[in-house]
Amino acid sequence: MSSVTRIHDLPQHVGESVTLEAWLTGSRSSGKIAFLQLRDGSGFVQGVLPADAVDEDTFQTARALDQEAAVHVVGTVAEDVRAPSGVELHVTGLTLVAAGNEYPITPKEHGVDFLFEHRHVHLRHKRPWAILRIRDLVERSIHDFFAERGFLRFDAPFFMPTAVEGTTNLFEIDLFGEDTAYLSQSGQLYAEAGALAFGKVYTFGPTFRAEKSKTRRHLLEFWMIEPEVAWLDHAGNMQLQEDFVAYLAGRVLEGAKEELALLERDTTVLEATAQGGFPRMTYDAALDALKAAGEELTWGDDFGAPHETILGDLHDRPVFIEGWPTQTKAFYMEPYEDDPTRVKAADLIAPEGYGEIIGGSQRIHDLALLERRIAEHDLPSEAFAWYVDLRRHGSVPHSGFGMGLERLLAWFTGVNHLREVVPFPRMLTRMYP
Ligand code: 4AD
Ligand code: MG
């Protein structure tokens, strides 16, 4: 088999003859010349085919290609300053491998529902291409960030005996009528065991929440990254989050220029984010800011999407909201010594209307206090026995956080719904394909 070049690498082969394995995304032609829009998964390029460059049969084959026909193409790479990739292909040979056969997503405008009903082929198009390549880059950058800092990747189970983040959005699994399990809302509790064993760990896996609300920020299944670090306090935890998000913004700006341009993403805010220096705001100051914006809340209320949007828009980069009321937050959060009505927790709110991207806190490490909190929250003490046990053997302050991958990606790519940043989104209104 002759060697194949990927479209992404064509700029390194100017003047050379190459073979592509590609699909046709569109074409136009006259009796004298055909212009073929080609993709191969790594990129997009235009093939130019003058009638006299090939025999009559090949030219007619090229002209008759339908959308998404699979082809082998041979051609010479030529510079073309007008093309986004800087090159085009002067075609010298072409064979049809498989026809497109009435491909459903035609160049006309289609509604979102139609596109997601055809998600299995919609993935071939330019927007999903750019977005999912950024997803891949962010996933790799996440692993790099933690590997460079000595973290161990630690896989938490997906079947759980307990809830972590409240019981209202749990998916229950019937274990053959013998017992009940839940799909994991968060790997945090297991990551805490990991932190005490390995010092610094992070989980990276799917998490599940039975969210009945149909918002653009909620999926039933999303991927979460949950670092957990022994001996780390609340301030250090926020610093780690800031370093992390700034690092990811920098990696995307550097490594996804073509994708961001294709999405017409204004990168001003991402550039500010890559600088770090995220502002910190107290919960009380946030209540004041909301009141000034006409949204009055009572002390202890949690923020909804409109509130997060207002707070996120106060700055050109993400903002930490800290000093949360103990009553508002999860059972495992460490209260302040001098004010037990507040916990050492922060939410990180993205600008541009994307809302909370991270929730994190210092964890209770005192045995008696944790037992009391579990009782106050009416949680089943037997199921939490192992978690409490961690406080019996060399218990130290430790902290961690959870970042929703899709929230971060929706913001980075500037899309208006989380479903766009997952290959096959899972929502109340979408289980197919
Ligand atoms: O704030 P949450 O509920 O925090 C936790 O689960 C902690 N146990 C994390 C930890 O400290 N290890 O969720 C964390 C993040 C949110 O900030 C948000 O980005 C994302 O998970 N998230 C969702 N993303 C998409 N769809 C949903 N339904 C989400 N619910 C939460
Ligand atoms: Mg949260």
Image (cartoon, helix red, strand yellow):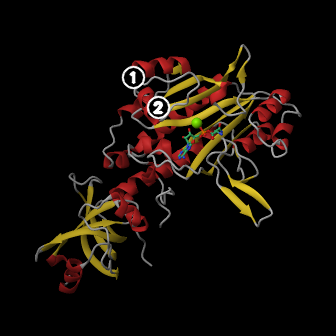
Relative to the observer, which residue lies in front, 207 or 374?
374
Mark 1 vs 2: CB contact within 8 A: no
Query: Which disc, if any, is residue 294?
Result: 1
Residue 108 versus residue 268 in the image, above or below:
below
- The mark that comes first in sequence, 1 or 2, is 1
Q: Nearer the viewer, mark 1 or mark 2?
A: 1
Q: Nearer the viewer, residue 328 or 93?
A: 328
- Alpha-carbon neighbours of circle 1 within 10 Å: few (<14), some, or many (≥20)? few
Report how far apart the C-alphas of labels 1 and 2 lie in the structure: 13 Å
Where does the N terminus fall, quadrant-wise?
bottom left
Label 1: element kind? loop
Q: Is residue 27 above or below residue 185?
A: below
Q: Position of residue 192 (x, y in %)?
A: 75, 39
Image coordinates of residue 53 in percent, x first then y, are 18, 76
Residue found farthest to the right: 393
Q: In the displayed image of the protein, which residue is found farthest to the left? A: 31
The answer to which quarter of the image holds residue 32 is bottom left
Residue type (three-letter) at the residue carrying disc 2: Glu
Quadrant in the picture for residue 396 = top right
Q: Is residue 295 left or right of residue 26?
A: right
Residue 301: image location, x then y, percent: 56, 27
Residue 347 occupies quadrant: top right
Does 152 appear above or below 109? above
Residue name at image x 56 percent, y 21 percent: 299
Comparing 360 with 174, the one in front is: 174
Residue occupying image coordinates x 51% and y 17%: 285
Q: Amino acid at mark 1?
A: Gly
Residue 419: x and y, percent?
45, 53
Residue located farthest toward the bottom when viewing the structure as drawn:
57
- The residue wearing badge 2 is 308
In the figure, is residue 362 to the left or right of 426? right
